[in-house]
Amino acid sequence: MTATTVTPKAPVTPEPPGAEARVRVRASRLVLYTVLVVVTGLMLGPFGWLVVTGLKTTPELAASPVHWLPDAIQWHNFADAFTQIDFLGYARNSLIVSLIYATLVTLSSAWVGFGFARLDAPGKKVLFGVLLGSMMLPQMITLFPTYLIFAKLGMVDTYWPWVLWGLAAAPYLVFLFRQFFAGMPRELEEAAIVDGASYPRIFRQIFLPQSWPVLAASFVIAFTWSWGDFIAPMLLLSSDRTTLSVAIMTSYVTPGGLPVNNLLAAGSVMYVVPILLIFLVAQRGFVAGMSTTGLK
């Protein structure tokens, strides 16, 4: 009989525990990152097209079919957009208006939000519901009556309307502060009341210093509102005091009144830069404020 030699099989090395789970996590992350890149591209697409438009010549803008990229980059369009109008002067006007409004409305909204969150009074919930309901009103409904009031008071062509708007608080910002202050421990104010502190002092020395994320978010939001506003400066300010948004939309035109689109695009790109810089500086506080608002 012939002996049969049996070759021993190599031992199978088992996969380390959790390897399959890690593969699934990596696959899900890849899908997530792909979706984020696509969404980011869609969001940045209009701004990228604005930049490309600002680098084209007038014939390239009128070409059919669409001329996607300029044959020669026209950097001078940005210089022309900057020098054709008093760009720095109008930007200074926009900065003054936006800083006045953003600073005052942030502080006034914080104070009103503190009252809704920490003080008890009859009808508080009803009043808060009315406040939230006012966010549904379009700006045009209140703008013209407001203009008539400011005209009667002699405040047209001054910065007083933005001061009064700032002192009046903003419903959305009040909601942000109210949600944030409602999540703070009740023991903070009770200890301060025992020590003899009044509510204005409690707000100023305890609640306000701890609300810097919401303060940053509120300031960025309010600054963006005012910087991007076109209708109110158009109605209330003269051509010398008007803001950059109005100047850009009304100044880059031909003698026949047609818009010069490449200069309009170049000026719009420079117009957006301050908002991007402010967001980059305050982004940590902005994101923290938006993510912590309403969390107990």
Image (cartoon, rainbow, N blue to C red):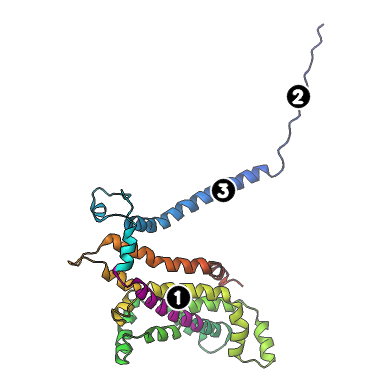
Q: Is mark 1 on a helix, strand or loop?
A: helix
- Magenta-colored stretch includes residue 86: yes
Residue under label 1, please give it. 222
Residue under label 3, please give it. 28
User: In the picture provided, is 254 more to the left or to the right than 207?
Assistant: left
Amino acid at the residue labelled 2 = Lys
Q: Which of 85 and 237 is in front in this view?
A: 85
State the residue at coordinates (69%, 91%). Answer: 194
Q: Where in the figure is residue 86, as x and y percent of width and height? A: 32, 73
Q: Distance between the residues labelled 2 and 3?
A: 37 Å
Q: Is residue 26 visible?
A: yes
Q: Residue furthest top?
A: 1
User: In which image quadrant can residue 136 be found?
Assistant: bottom left
Q: Distance between the residues labelled 1 and 2?
A: 73 Å
Q: In this view, does 156 lie above or below 260?
A: below
Q: Distance between the residues labelled 3 and 1?
A: 37 Å
Decide which of tag 2 and tag 3 comes sooner along the chain: 2
Q: Is the residue under label 2 in contact with that under label 1 (CB below 8 Å)?
A: no
Q: Where in the figure is residue 133, as x and y percent of width and height? A: 42, 78
User: In the picture provided, is 182 more to the left or to the right than 151?
Assistant: right
From the image, state whether disc 1 or disc 2 is nearer to you. Answer: 1
Residue interval drawn in magenta: 84-108
